[in-house]
Amino acid sequence: MIAAADRALVDKLVLANRILYRYGVVDGFGHASVRHDSSPGHFLLARNMAPALVRRDDIVTFDLDGTALDAAGRRVYLERFIHGEIYRARPDVQAVVHSHSPNVIPFGVTGQSLQPVFHMSGFLGEGSALFEIRDVAGDTDMLVSNNRLGAALAAALGSRSLVLMRGHGSTVVGSSVRYAVFNAIYTEKSAALQSEAMRLGAVTYLTRDEARAAAACNAGQIDRSWELWKLAAARPRFQPQT
Ligand SMILES: [Zn+2]
């Protein structure tokens, strides 16, 4: 048995679930995870439930194969393999968000790459990757519901921050819970902006160097967003703005 995860980290993951709901990244579906703080071969993810309703007691520990250590009979997410296989393939990744956020879907189905359209999406400097599940498993229900599909998704992601999943959604990674949430919120926002810009005409994206510099600048100010998002998640009547 491994040591219990840091309580503050668990609380941060609970908060991340609620924030992602408030900002329209997840609805009844989608999920967020974090790598275990003292055991890199494990990760934390809620049991099978709507993200906005997640509480501390709903967080379950998994190994990288997606086997739950302490589910105690509770249902777990069908797509937990997304998380385990990305943590296995990417030691730098500490948190993962999988969602079906609507503005991203058109990119996956057209094979159009998401690019850094503005400075807040500097993390997209390498552009998005694309996962075509049909190439791996033929006709399926589109879900990444086993280790083989999870590993194929992780391979498609490669060294990037975002992988589009054709006809399904996307998965974004970060070096912490806060970065993964930041990247998930700005993936959705960036997708809406890029779609709009493409309707108007030829788009000038940030160069790789501009994107890298912008991402570094954003990283230094992430607390500013996180504090606002915490407020939005805690107060149902508060109208969230990014
Ligand atoms: Zn999904």
Image (cartoon, rainbow, N blue to C red):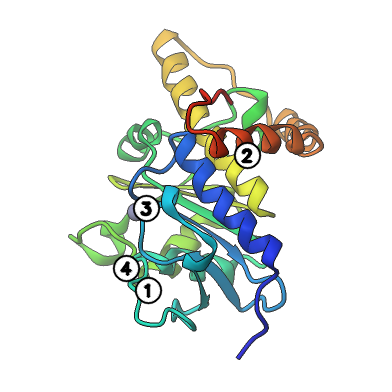
Marks 4 and 1 sit apart, C-alpha to C-alpha, by 9 Å
Q: Position of residue 168 (x, y in %)?
A: 31, 47
Q: Amino acid at mark 1?
A: Arg
Label placed on residue 230: 2
Residue 102: in sight, yes or no? yes
Q: Residue at x 50, y 50 (%)?
A: 17
Q: To which residue does mark 4 refer?
A: 145
Q: Is residue 228 left or right of residue 170?
A: right
Q: Which residue is mark 1?
A: 148
Give the residue at mark 3: 50
For marks 2 and 3, the one nearer the N-term is: 3
Separation of residues labelled 2 and 3 (CA atoms):
18 Å
| Image height of 153 relative to 210, above or below | below
Extreme residue toward the left, this view: 139
Instruction: Name the kind of residue labelled 3 in the image.
Output: Ala
User: Three-letter amino acid code at disc 2?
Assistant: Lys
